Structures are given as C-alpha cells and as structure tokens.
Image (cartoon, rainbow, N blue to C red):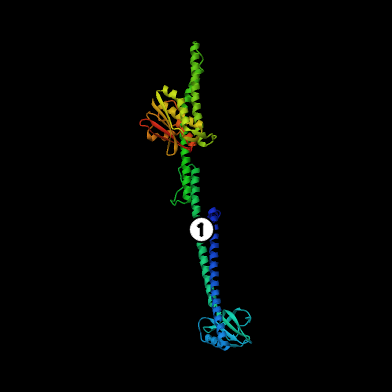
Amino acid sequence: MPIGVFRSARRLIGTHAFRLAALYFLVFAASVLGVLLFVYLTSADFVERQTEATLDAEITGLAEQYAQRGLSGLIQIVAARSAGDRGDAMIYLVTDPDGKPFAGNIAAWPPGVPLHSAWLSFTLERVVNGRPELHPARGRLFIIPGGYRLLVGRDVSDGAAFRGQVRATLLWAGLVALGIGVIGGTVMSRNLLRRVEQVNRTSERVMAGNLSDRVPLRGTSDEFDQLALNLNRMLDQIERLMTAMREVTDDVAHDLRTPLSRLRTRLERALVPPSEAGAAAGSAQNEAIRAAIEEADRLLATFNALLRIAELESGARRDNTEPLDLAEVARSAGELYEPVAEEKGFTLNVLAEPGVRIRGDRHLLSQALANLLDNAVKYAGGGELELRVFTESGQAVLEVADRGPGIPEADRQNVLDRFVRLEPSRTTPGNGLGLSLVRAIVQRHDGSVTLDDNTPGLRVRLKFARLPT
C-alpha cells in the first residue's frame, strides 16, 4: 500500500467522523441481523406449524374413521390413500403389535423410531429419478386398541429446502445490506470530514492573517451550514474590530499629536528664564503653565473616555443596575444643563411622560444624556432643545432633539464610532468620543441608538426595554 494512502486511511480512522460512522454501522448491522434472524425464525416456525397442523387434521380424521368403521375400515382407507403417487408427500402405515405392516406407502416401521412418542422425527429412503435419497420426515403416532399402530407422517424435505432457500436469501440480503452500510458509513464519514476540513482550512488561513477568508456555505441549511454561518459572522465581527482598532490607532495618533505638541511648546515657554521685566515674564510663565495644565486635562479626558468605552464594551464594569424612572433622570439632566443652554442662547424643554421605568445604571444613563445635551449645545448653534421621555411599541424612549444643522444620513452610523468628527479641520474642541460613549452605555443596557432628522436639526433616540408597571 502506498505511504500516502496509508496515512490518509490512518487519519480517516482517527477522526471523530469515522468513529461516529462506525458506531452507526454497528447499530445498522445489529438491526439488519436482528431483522433477518426474526424473518428466518418466523418462516421456519410457520412451515413447522403448518406441517403439524396438517398431520393433526389427518390423524384426527383417521381416528374418526376408525371409530366408525373399525380396524378393517381404517386399513381400507389407509390403503386407498396410500395407493398411487398423490404428490402431497404424505406417509401412512398401519402395523400389528409385532410391527408387521397391514397397509401404507412405506414398507416397514422406520428404524430407530420409538413406538410410544406422540410426535416422531425420522428419515426415509425415497427413490427419486431412479436414485435413492434420504428425506427427512415428521410424523404423528396413533395407538389403536389391541396394540395396533397408525403412523401418519409427511416428507418435510420441501420444507427443509424452503428453509435453506430462506437462509441463503437472507444471508445474501444481509451481506448486501452490510455492504451498503459500509459504503454509506464511509461516504458519510468522508462527507463529515470534508466539511470539518473546510472549517479547519479557513481557520488556518485566518490565523495566517487573511481575515477576509470565510467558510464556504452549501446552501443546505443543515447544522454545518449554520455552524459556517455563525463562524463567518464571528469572523466578520473580528475583521470589523481589527479595522476599527487600526482606525482608532490612526485617530489617536492624529488627535493626540497636536495637543501634545502644544503642551510641549507651552512647557518650553515656561522654562524660559525671566527677563528684566520680571513681573510681566512671571505672568507669561504662569499663563503657559495654566495652558499646559488645561491641555493635559483634555488629554486625560480623552484617555478616560477611551477607557470608559472599552470597559463598557467588554462588560467588565460592575453591575449597578436598579429600577429607574426615566422621567426623573431626564428632569435631573435638564436642571443641570438649563443654565448652560440659556447662556448659549437655547431654550431647553423637558417633556417627560411619568411612569416610564427601565432597569439601568443611573450614573451611566445620566452621563449618556449629558453627552447628548453637551453635543447639542456645542453644535446646534441656538434655538430650541427638546428632551423627551415616552413609550413607543412597548419600549421606553429617551430622546434629545435640536434645531441645528443636523448630520447627513450617510454619516449617521459613522459618527457613533470612536474619534469620528464631521469637521475635517478638527479645530472645534472635542475628541469625537461623546457619541461612542453614548452607544456603549446604551448597548450595555441592551438598548439601541438611532439618529434621525428633526427637519431641521438632529433627533437622537435611545430605546430601552420597559419594565412592567
């Protein structure tokens, strides 16, 4: 056997698919053998019971004839039934107490056959086509008063031949069924192994760095297709996360380079020795240090926001959820931001439907709402701000709407990602993490975030599962 074939066969035997197919084959073989054995035993028993029923009926009829006509009449009937070749393989013999035959179609009492058993099994010599043959026979003994005996039997060679034919047929049928089972088990195991190998090869290519590779689907909607579909979804998510990680890395480098450069420049200015005008130089130095501290605070805020988002998305944050009334959360945020809104030229209206309760973290939800209000105040430019709490389709909804320029529909999904800002110059204060943090908080509460038009303006809608009242 070639080495490659031997290795392939050895690998096939060592697989779980092969062991599963072998187990199914053993169960199949046991079932087939059980069915064939049942068929054979049932057939053989049927033939034997039919023979015994025929002999019973025959001996009963002759016993009735003996009762009516006596011994001489019985001998005449037996002689008549024994005359010629009836072709029904029946055997008749009437003997005296010494075994001398009076009538029948056999010459003498079969040798070795007991004289007092009700059912007899013996062998007869028959001449077939000019040649003597031994045939099995089955008989019934009837004792006649005075020591006379009546033997009624039947040549069961046809029944034996039938049983032999049944055995041969069932044997071949069993071999064919087992052969089909072997072929089917092999095909099944190879098919299972082929599907598993597809998953293994895809996994190897993904581990080698090809994140765009996917497990092929056959369109059969079976368990392997479902597994492949789930694995492909997992790989899609991994690819999205890796792409997002690269984008975040680029954005972090871009967003932090400028403030770090400004921070370094201001610290260098603070190190310049004071000139003769000491008071003016000291004031400039203090101003540079204050500006550097403010820049450091912005950098720390960016890193804290990143850490908070990562903590929420990983599920590592401790669970501080409790039943909350969203109206209370909205009113608290409105009271906090109302002075800021008025200072920026906004009118803040809070429209909260009472009794809208969810299970959540008050601090996180307040922070999400604060981020939305802060964005509205920062980018809407003025006008009316509306903070609403209501129910829709059995869900609790928290909504912030403004009358600003809004967000183009093509960008509404992107602005929820980290460091995404619609201002190309990125000169407006901010780090592009506010909406990302809002989405992370809402997803932590198993909710959803949608951005819609407010014609004009933007409407941000947060949806949560509502607690029953």
- 121 in relation to 333, above or below: below
Nearer to us in this view, 460 or 168: 460
x, y percentage for residue 272? 50, 16
In the rendered view, tell whether residue 62 sits above or below residue 49.
below
Closest to the observer, 68 or 360: 68
Q: What is the count of numbered marks?
A: 1
Q: What residue sits 50% from the left and 60% below the top?
A: 183
Residue 324: percent from left, percent from top? 50, 33
Q: Which quadrant of the figure has residue 420?
A: top left
- Give the x, y percent position of residue 468: 48, 38
* Residue 3 at least partly seen: no
Q: Is residue 39 left or right of residue 455?
A: right
Q: Is residue 85 left or right of residue 422?
A: right
Q: What element carries label 1?
A: helix
Q: In this view, does 26 lie above or below 143?
A: above
For the N terminus, the image quarter is bottom right
Residue 346 placement, left or right of 292: left
Q: Name the residue under label 1.
A: 186
* Along the viewing direction, whichever of 261 and 61 lies nearer the viewer: 61
Tell me residue 70's x, y (percent). 57, 87
In the figure, 464 relative to 255: above or below? below
Q: What residue type is labelled 1?
A: Thr
Residue 341 falls in image quadrant: top left
**Is residue 265 something one can see in this rendering?**
yes
The residue at the far top in this view is: 276
Q: Residues within 10 Å of mark 1 (few under 14, many from 20)?
A: some
Q: In which quarter of the image is residue 30?
A: bottom right
Q: Nearer the viewer, residue 4 or 109?
A: 109
